[in-house]
Every structure is written in C-alpha cells, then in structure tokens.
Amino acid sequence: MTKRHSIGLMMLLGSTLWTADLRALDVKIGQWETTTTGQMTGMPAIPPEALAHMTPEQRAKIESAMGARGAKPIVSTYCLTKEKLEQAWNTGQSMAKNCTTTMTSSSAGKQEVHMECNQNGTKMTGTVKVEAVDSEHTRGSIQMMAASADTGHAMNMNYSFTSKWLGAACTEAK
C-alpha cells in the first residue's frame, strides 16, 4: 500500500465529524495502537511508456511494491483525547470539502459512517464501522469503492483494523 493511501486511512481513522446523534464509544482515553490490514483491487497498471524508461531492476522493484500493497499490516499509534472521543470518524480536513459523511448508527459499542467523496473526477463511496470490544480494545472495517469518470477505472479497498489501549499517557504518534 502506498504511503499516500496509508496517510489517507490514518486521517480517516483519526479525524472528526460533528453530528447531532453521536454517542461516544465506551473506550479509554490515552495512547492507542492500531493495526490495519487489507487489500486494494483494481489498482491501475503502470503505463507502458513509464515501464519503457525503467531499468529491469527499477521495473522489478516497482512491480513488487505494487503487488505487495495491503499485504503488510500497518501499525500506527495515536492519542485519543476526550474531545476526539466525543466526535465521530470522517475523512480528515484535507478531503472534508469534497466529501459528505453521514453517521448511520452510533452507540457506546458501535459506530458506522457512510461517506461519499468526489475529487478530481473520481467518486468514492464507502463505509467505516468501529466496534468497542471492551474499554481497551476496538475493531472495525473500512470498505471503499472508487471510480474515475475520466478513465472508467474502478478500485475497491477492503481493510480491517484492531486497536488496543497502551496507557493513559500520550506520546508522539508514529
């Protein structure tokens, strides 16, 4: 998975949205660690003209990296504050003006958000589900579909994640 997609997922998982019907998840505040796994299908191929300008070693490295997208778990940490806990999940500030996010269900044990984005001719729709297993563990899923109006290219992203509470004191996120 590319760094850009990793950052997008982390923004998705750690950002906020205001909603009238939000009920905070029943989890502890403090430092959390999230492990995300999944896959993307329908990734665009490397254009032949780009491949023609690469050495065999460069081509092998790029093709290997593209084939490994989503294969390795992504582990990140973040600080969950009381303020963040009282807000819902969304796409992050950089995409907020291009996305509509709707809280479809919210309780102390589960939250579900539906999102629709349209940016530069690409439409994305999807669902984020989060469940508080207990006060120190959460799990969830992210399912997104993207389609380009320009090329007709479609891509599907299916990820799952687990999070565990590391402690009340927050440190730098990694």
Image (cartoon, helix red, strand yellow):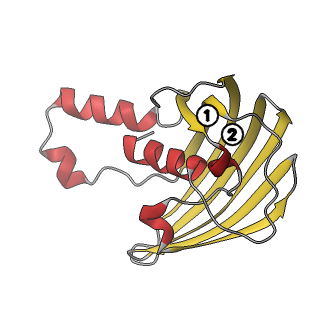
As drawn, the label of residue 37 is: 1
Q: Is residue 71 visible?
A: no
Categorize mark 2 by other alpha carbons within 10 Å: few (<14), some (14-19), many (20+).
some
Query: Which residue is located at x 12 percent, y 44 percent?
Result: 53
Amino acid of disc 1? Thr
Nearer to the camera, 122 or 165: 165
Query: Which residue is located at x 64 percent, y 51 percent?
Result: 83
Asked if the residue at tag 2 contacts the one at tag 1, i.e. Cβ–Cβ closer than 8 Å, the answer is yes
Q: CA distance from mark 1 to mark 2?
A: 6 Å
- For label 2, the residue is 160
Left or right of 124 on screen, residue 122:
left
Left or right of 155 on screen, residue 25:
right
**Residue 155 at x, y = what percent?**
53, 58
In the rendered image, the quadrant that contains the C terminus is top left
Left or right of 172 on screen, residue 132:
right
Q: Is 155 situated above or below 52?
A: below
